[in-house]
Amino acid sequence: HRIPKPTGLDPDAPVFLALVLNAYRDRKLPEPQLAQLVLSCGEVFVMLYAVAEEGSRAARDGAVAGRMPGDEAGGEEAFETVGEWFKACVMDHGSCRFGGEGSLVEGGGRGDEVVDLPHRVLDLEAVSGDEGVVRLVETESDIGVRRKGQYIALSHRWPIDPKQHFMTTRPVLEQRKKLIRLEDMPASYKDAVTVTRRLGVRYLWIDSLCIVQDDVGDWEREAALMGSIYHNSTLTIMAATSIKKHKDEIEGSEQNVEHSSNGFLGKRHGSKQQVRVKLEYVDEQWNTTGDYWDVVDRGSLELVDRNMELFTRGWVMQEEMLPRRRILYAPDHLI
């Protein structure tokens, strides 16, 4: 066996370079924004994020897409940012609205989008005034009329161990319709409830709770509709939490801590090899007017898989591609 060099670079390996800009650029700008550069060679994987201080010339010009991240995804600054993005998109981006440009919303103008809700959703309105309780509701009336409204969907990584799945089955369906205590939910579900409430949306769709998991007929019906469920959502939250490892004291083996239990609103934790490099900002007239930063995150492909493990799952592809709006909570940034 050939011993790899400590750097992980392989002189015979191809170099892959990708510039990520189309998905997040500001369409009002004549030129693309500086956003994200991805470089890989062998086992080495480098990501460069362009970020600017709030209020800097680079930020005011809109030429640099990113902003300096706060310490907590669940902090007030992060909630304000997500709220501003959400409001601007719903109110001003006609192509993102359900039905596309020129589509009418309730009231015949700009405002909240209204669609047929999925067959089941979580109603986040407090039950008996208790904010710590939500409930599962069925949205179709006895005559087949579906309730309308807004809802947010959650894209998340299911636990590996089926025993740790928090889900709806036939024996607990009626109880779920009466109440579900937030304290019983995995952390990522509770975080999704928090974000949904902060954005002023009443309903939340989570696959494991809104599909009866031990009912083959119900599962087949809902699975066939899942593309439209994500597309029709006012927003899809993508919980790209990292895999945390721990040592099993009895067996001495390394195990995965279940993913849904990690949550995504906690303190951000970038790679230990992440560094910031200050660069001069040159405006359209070629004048040096301040600076911006490149956040350099060097790791390995294995590290990337651990930190963004949600995207290693084929099932998640539709959850990424079909929603009209997405908010991605990654371990060290918010998109």
Image: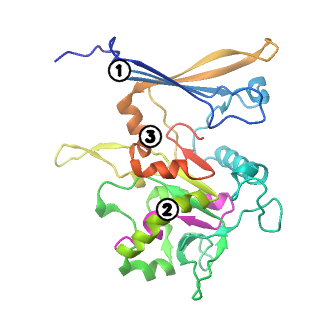
Q: Magenta span has 213?
A: yes
Crowd around label 2: few <14 · some 14–19 · many ≥20 (10 Å): some
In the image, which disc is placed on residue 226? 2
Residue at mark 1: 42
Q: Magenta span has 251?
A: no
- Residue at mark 1 to residue at mark 3: CA–CA distance: 19 Å
Residue at mark 3: 308
SS assignment at label 2: helix
At horizontal 34% and vertical 11% (from top left) the residue drawn is 11
Quadrant where the C terminus sits is: top right
What stretch of residues is rendered in magenta?
196-215
Q: Earlier in the sequence, mark 2 or mark 1?
A: 1
At horizontal 29% and vertical 13% (from top left) the residue drawn is 5
Which amino acid, by three-letter code, is at mark 1?
Answer: Gly
Vertical placement of residue 207 versus 79, above or below: below
Total labels: the figure holds: 3
Q: Earlier in the sequence, mark 2 or mark 3?
A: 2
Query: Disc 2 vs disc 1: which is toward the camera?
Result: 2
